[in-house]
Image (cartoon, helix red, strand yellow):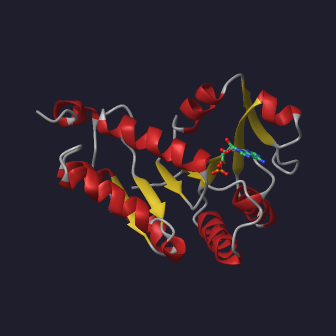
Amino acid sequence: MIIKKICVYCASSPKVNKIYFDATEELANELVKENIEVVYGGGAHGLMGKLADTIIENGGKIKGIMPKFMDEVEWSHKGVTDFEFTETMHERKAKFLIGIDALVTLPGGSGTLEELFEAITLKRLGKFTKPIIILNTNGFYNPLKEMLNMLANEHFMRKKHLEMYTFVDNPNQVIDAIKNAVIWDESAINFAAII
Ligand code: AMP
């Protein structure tokens, strides 16, 4: 499997612990080394800023997708030259998932979680079929993992749905996790419902 382009969701907050910045930098370096283009939210600060800074510094490829209203309040990263501006947040989220080979979610806030859950929901319905990797730096996503397991244990989704995503602890496990993800296709609609 050749990985050409991935989408990365991550925090906009600049106040998070250094451990999350370090993991973001490590992942960015890994992606540049593998010549993988990155699509992200276009932000200049927080983990988004670290991701873009590291990729640009190392000569990698990165594209930002952002609603116009965020650009108008100067949230866009000035060093990112490839940008697509959308009218709405919904349009932006839809564009993130077009033409990518995988989605990687780093620690983040409500925006990151919303984006991740839209992708998981679309995957359950067979409308998005690419690997979803969740980088569990510092155990950040342990409560989320527990919540998702609860959904399966309590029959709010199927055990099979736990195969829609992969948790990894370290950035250097992301590429392998993409390559080893369970194959998924449009037929997922046939077992999306619990009957
Ligand atoms: P969060 O995980 O809540 O930090 O949200 C990340 C997402 O929130 C991004 O994809 C953006 O939609 C949005 N966002 C919030 N604050 C900013 C910011 N300062 N710059 C760019 N995007 C932001």
Q: Is residue 195 above or below residue 77?
A: above
Residue 116 left/right relative to 57: left
Q: Is residue 123 above or below residue 50?
A: above
- Judging depth in this view, the residue of 9 and 152 nearest the camera is 152
Q: Is residue 103 above or below residue 146?
A: above
- Judging depth in this view, the residue of 159 and 151 nearest the camera is 151
Residue 3 left/right relative to 156: right
- Residue lying at 61% horizontally and 45% vertically, measured from the top left: 111
The N terminus appears in which quarter of the rendering? bottom left
- Residue lying at 70% horizontally and 61% vertically, measured from the top left: 47
- Residue lying at 64% horizontally and 71% vertically, measured from the top left: 20
The C terminus appears in which quarter of the rendering? top left
Count of number-bearing discs: 0
Q: Quadrant of residue 123?
A: top left
Q: Residue lying at the far top in this picture: please name it.
A: 87
Please provide percent x and percent y for residue 11: 66, 56
Please provide percent x and percent y for residue 27: 60, 68
Please provide percent x and percent y for residue 41: 68, 44
Residue 182 shows in this picture: no
Residue 67 left/right relative to 3: right
- Residue lying at 65% horizontally and 77% vertically, measured from the top left: 19
